[in-house]
Image (cartoon, rainbow, N blue to C red):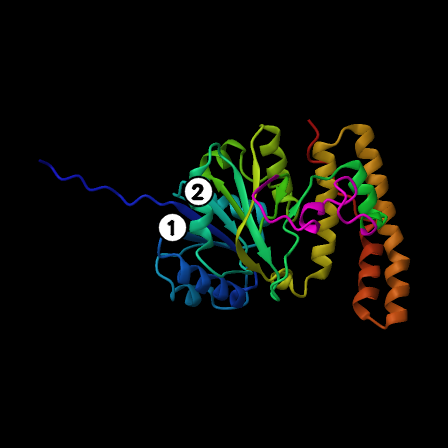
Amino acid sequence: MEEQVQKLEIDVSIIIINYYSTELLEGCLDSIFKYMNKINSEIIIVDNGSVAGDLENLLSKYSGVKLVTNQSNKGFGAANNQGAELAKGKYLLFLNNDTIIQENSIKKVFDYANSISGENIIGCRLLNEDGSIQKSVFDFPTLVNVFTSNFFLYLLFPKSKHFNKYHLINKGINSITDVEVVTGAFLFITKNIFKKLGGFDERFFFYMDETDLCYRHKQNKEKVIYYPETSVIHLKGKSAKGESWFKNKYQSISTIKFFQKHFSTMKFILAIFFHYSGLMLRIPIFLIGGILLMKKDLVKRSFYYLRIIFIYPANEFKS
């Protein structure tokens, strides 16, 4: 009888984008290797043109890690798509480099994904560094929640489904729930469905990538699931330290791009009006608040909002 040598199948391909964050990446990888002994996985690092830190020297500490290096910052979605092209796993886990695994979370999500029907997008509970629950589940933009978020009405109705896109987290959901969007910091999906969706839309350079992906997935009558039975620490914002202008700029640009792609004409016009009205409202609020409270960060944000009102991205979604 001839012996057949079977290749070890990979369950999960973990794709991590790195950009100027060697220290954060090291903490992330240390935590993954600590808890990944019960699942067949591979790790793919896509570096978006970093110049700080000796990345190759760092990765020599970890066996089997694949590295893709870009000469420039290609954006979050494009870099993740690169990693997905190389991935051999049944499932893809898009994981931020500023996350810390605390237990065998990836195995738990993998086991859950295999226990249910359908090809779903799954996100777990995310925690802040102090252990508090992070806003990691939210609703798609609607005219109502775009209005309420831009005019601060969401603060008055934190648990309202219509007025606050983070209403589910604000209610403190602790059970497995069908939701609209899970954050891209921990996004678990079958490679098959990711390919069918065409991956991340690379026209979103930064932010709204996962919202657009989940939106297209839900349009196909599939599920996005919040799985709070395991938690991961997300050091939110630390990977973009020192890039506040970048963050504010692309949050606005990507939000407008989502309107361009998915909103009808009248809905789009109203959303743009609410968006820019909200930006202009924030200029004096943050300026006065910064002066009265003597906080430079608030004054800086006011200046950012002033600059952003003069930025409007070209519509790349015209048919």
**Residue 165 painted magenta:** yes
Q: Which residue is mark 2?
A: 91
Q: Quadrant of the C terminus?
A: top right
Furthest residue in direction left, as rendered:
1
Q: Residue at x 68, y 66 (%)?
A: 242
Q: Residue at x 38, y 63 (%)?
A: 62
Work out whether residue 48 can be spotted: no
Q: Which residue is mark 1?
A: 41
Q: Residue at x 40, y 40 (%)?
A: 90
| Magenta stretch bounds | 155-178
Q: Which element carries disc 1, helix, strand or loop?
A: strand
Identify which residue, 58 or 318, lies in the foreground. Answer: 58
Work out whether residue 150 can be spotted: yes
Q: Amino acid at mark 2?
A: Tyr
Q: Position of residue 184 (x, y in %)?
A: 58, 48
Q: Position of residue 169 (x, y in %)?
A: 67, 49
Q: Position of residue 286 (x, y in %)?
A: 86, 61
Mark closest to the chain's N terminus, 2 or 1: 1
The quadrant in which residue 21 appears is bottom right
Q: Position of residue 113 (x, y in %)?
A: 46, 41
Identify which residue, 232 or 288, lies in the foreground. Answer: 232
Q: Amino acid at mark 1?
A: Ser
Mark 2 vs mark 1, CA separation in Å: 9 Å
| Left or right of 267 on screen, residue 183 | left
Check the image and report above or below for 277 versus 238: above
Q: Residue at x 83, y 60 (%)?
A: 303
